[in-house]
Amino acid sequence: MRPFSLARRLGVGSQRGSHGRRGRQRGAEVVALALTLGVFFMLIFGGAEIARLLYAYNATGYLAHEAVRYAVVRGSLASQDAGRTDAPASGATLTTFVNGLGLLSPVTVSACWSGTFGTPCDCMSNSPAMNNDVNNQPGMPVRVCVTARYQPLVLPQLLWFGPATLKSQAEGTILY
């Protein structure tokens, strides 16, 4: 009968054969742990990045919607109201309003006030400027395009895309 040895029980010491199979098992466990943790963290960080992308996408749509709401109640007749200092809406006031909401930064805003629209999200260069006497009257359409740049933060080199441009547009009819 062998005497009890704590070193033998723990698997350390200078017993014969202690380095062989047990040492290889520990090495395999470390490799398996490293691979598993790598996949686990990729899934966690990838999920967080996709959540950020979806937030930016939804925020872009929300900002376009809010900008149109801002524009439709600030037409040419709204400036006749003595209590209003922010009417009529213009491209500059829309940009200030959208960036003031603070959901995304930086955000580019373009707007069209004419009856015929140019290409989407490029209407400032393809349509006439806002004119209170012509295209900012009640019943006229207004289209607002919001563009935001999305830059991945977590592991951008391992994701399938780099920086992305998110665009959203909304359209409404000027009320007053």
Image (spheres, rainbow, N blue to C red):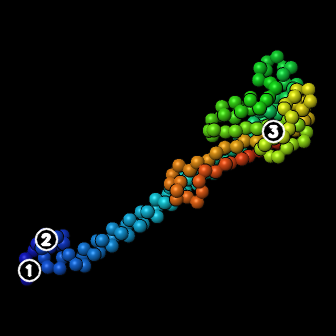
Q: Position of residue 169 (x, y in %)?
A: 77, 44
* Residue 61 on image: x %, y %: 71, 45
Q: Which residue is mark 2?
A: 13
The alpha-carbon separation of the residues under discs 3 and 1 comes to 92 Å
State whether residue 29 appears in this view: yes
Residue assigned mark 1: 2
10 Å crowding of disc 1: few (<14), some (14-19), many (20+):
few
Q: CA distance from mark 1 to mark 2?
A: 15 Å
Q: Secondary structure at mark 1?
A: loop
Mark 3 lies on a secondary structure that is helix
The disc labelled 3 sits on which kind of residue? Answer: Ser
Q: Tag 2 or tag 3, which sits nearer the N-term?
A: 2
Q: Residue at x 29, y 75 (%)?
A: 25
Q: Quadrant of residue 72?
A: top right
What residue is shown at x 61% (from left), y 50% (from top)? Answer: 163
Which picture quadrant has residue 8? bottom left
Which residue of the protein is positioned furthest toward the front in this rendering?
Answer: 125
Relative to 6, 160 lies left or right: right
Residue 172: in sight, yes or no? no
Label 1 amino acid?
Answer: Arg
Nearer-the-camera pick, 60 or 122: 122
Task: Depth check: give the residue in front, 124 or 64.
Answer: 124
- Residue 38 position, x and y percent, is 43, 63
Task: Name the residue that disc number 3 marks.
Answer: 125
In the picture shown, does residue 42 fall above or below 124? below
Say whether disc 3 or disc 1 marks the residue closer to the N-terminus.
1
Does 126 sit above or below residue 38?
above
Mark 3, residues whose alpha carbon is within 10 Å: few (<14), some, or many (≥20)?
few
Q: Are marks 3 and 1 in contact (CB under 8 Å)?
A: no
Q: Earlier in the sequence, mark 1 or mark 2?
A: 1
Q: Is label 3 or label 2 in front?
A: 3
Image location of residue 49, percent across then percent down: 55, 53
